[in-house]
Image (cartoon, rainbow, N blue to C red):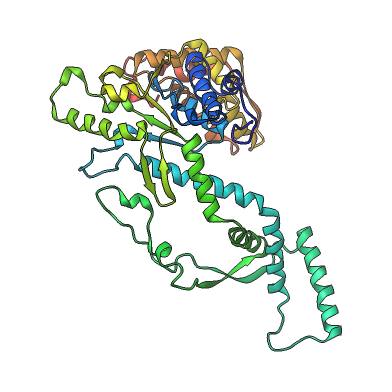
Amino acid sequence: MKFLEFGKELTPREIVKELDQYIIGQEKAKKAVAIALRNRWRRQHVEGDIKEDIMPNNIILIGPTGVGKTEIARRLSNLAHAPFIKVEASKFTEIGYVGRDVESMIRDLANIAVNMVRAERMEEVEEQAGLMANERILDILLPLSPTKTPEEGETVSISNTREKFRQMLDNGTMEDRVVEINISDNGNVASMQIFGPVGMEEMGMDLKEMLGNVFPKKKKKKKVTVKEARELFKIEEAQKMIDMEAIKKEAIRRVEQSGIVFLDEIDKIAKNSDSAGKGPDVSREGVQRDILPIVEGSNVQTKYGVVKTDHILFIAAGAFHMTKPSDLIPELQGRFPIRQELSSLSREDFIKILKNPKNALLKQYKALLSTEGVEIEFEEDAVDEIALLATKANEKMENIGARRLHTILSTLLEDILYNVPDEMTENITITRTMVQEKLNEIIQDNDLSKYIL
């Protein structure tokens, strides 16, 4: 997969092509997010003061559950190798009420970015950290006396023995040997969360961070295998080699320049025009007004530094069954200039979803059963029947889109998944008849609520 962050820039057509591997249909929505992502790359390459005035094209995706809204945003963040967070707008409360304040989404995004950059830096020094970890293991296997200085002949002998042990470590012959090691005890200072009216608990402030330079780090003894010791030592050595201040600075830059916030269920905080003046709607409008400055562009204090939200891309999504986008306050509507309505999924879409994506459901079940030495195949007629039954179930019950395929396949394959490998070890072929026998009676029942579908 190609990443925008590392200079392999995808054009809008290439972005859509990548999204096509995971998301069926919804061409207009994919086109809109592809343009929004490419525009961010374009802005970063603009010269002059006008660069700061180019705002992101925030998007509202409108459509019922299970049609691909979240998946589009998630795959988009993977393509851009960007910090990404999904939050539910309905979980936030207005300032002055107990609950999560809206700035917590930016603080959480900063945490994600720091973890992302730290993982990259740890990977860069992994090889060197592995060598240093082996040296520490050799020191344990061949400890030198602290009071006795080896003579010249002993030094040569120790050096030869150490080289033999190093070769044994390299070829893996000592992996299961148990050794006693000293590792840092990260729990020697108790954590202390700080609660306050502006969500200070999200700042992650604790005694270990504030007093880390006051109290010496404690060590604890632990018996582990050589293989486990190497992994523990690699982490310790890698952490010594990385520059956390540089990591924090890079993480803040990525959040500001390429961060993506996916605001799900934004329809739940829209003020229903038919219920104007009712109590709950007052709180909803308050949450919108709290979100507004974050989307417009403001400074949010995090434990890594101040994050400017001016150029973070916000993608909002909602079903809008009881409300409509125009029920949002006008100022917030203006900050989401692009609106795309996602269509409900048809029987033909379900067939493609079952078979075509890289992570298609049928491919997932094949992979699961192959671990038991059992191959499962789905005939074309069977796939067509599953798609038909999913469509009928969505018509009779609440339309949950492609999520219906998960529940139907779970019901269809329940006995197979239970009996493999105890009673079933032969390869399996799913036919239309098998699907009908297992599911038709359920689908035709007028009271589908008693079934888990």
The C terminus is located in which quarter?
top left
Q: Is residue 212 above or below residue 148?
A: above
Residue in the image at 51% along x and 45% along y: 251
**Viewed as shown, does residue 138 lie left or right of 116?**
right
Query: Does residue 59 appear anywhere in the picture?
Result: yes
**Viewed as shown, does residue 71 lie left or right of 423?**
left
Q: Position of residue 208 (x, y in %)?
A: 42, 64
> How many marks can you see?
0
**Viewed as shown, does residue 71 lie left or right of 136?**
left
**Along the viewing direction, whichever of 210 and 218 lies nearer the viewer:** 210
Query: Does residue 432 appear anywhere in the picture?
Result: no
Q: Quadrant of residue 99?
A: top left
Q: Which residue ends up furthest to the bottom in the rendered image?
A: 147
Q: Position of residue 246 (x, y in %)?
A: 55, 52
Q: Is residue 357 above or below residue 131?
A: above
Residue in the image at 28% along x and 17% along y: 326
**Along the viewing direction, whichever of 255 and 346 lies nearer the viewer:** 255
Q: Position of residue 290 (x, y in %)?
A: 27, 35
Q: Quadrant of residue 162?
A: bottom right
Q: Position of residue 388 (x, y in %)?
A: 48, 12
The N terminus is located in which quarter?
top right
**Along the viewing direction, whichever of 165 and 127 lies nearer the viewer:** 127
Q: Is residue 89 above or below residue 343?
A: below
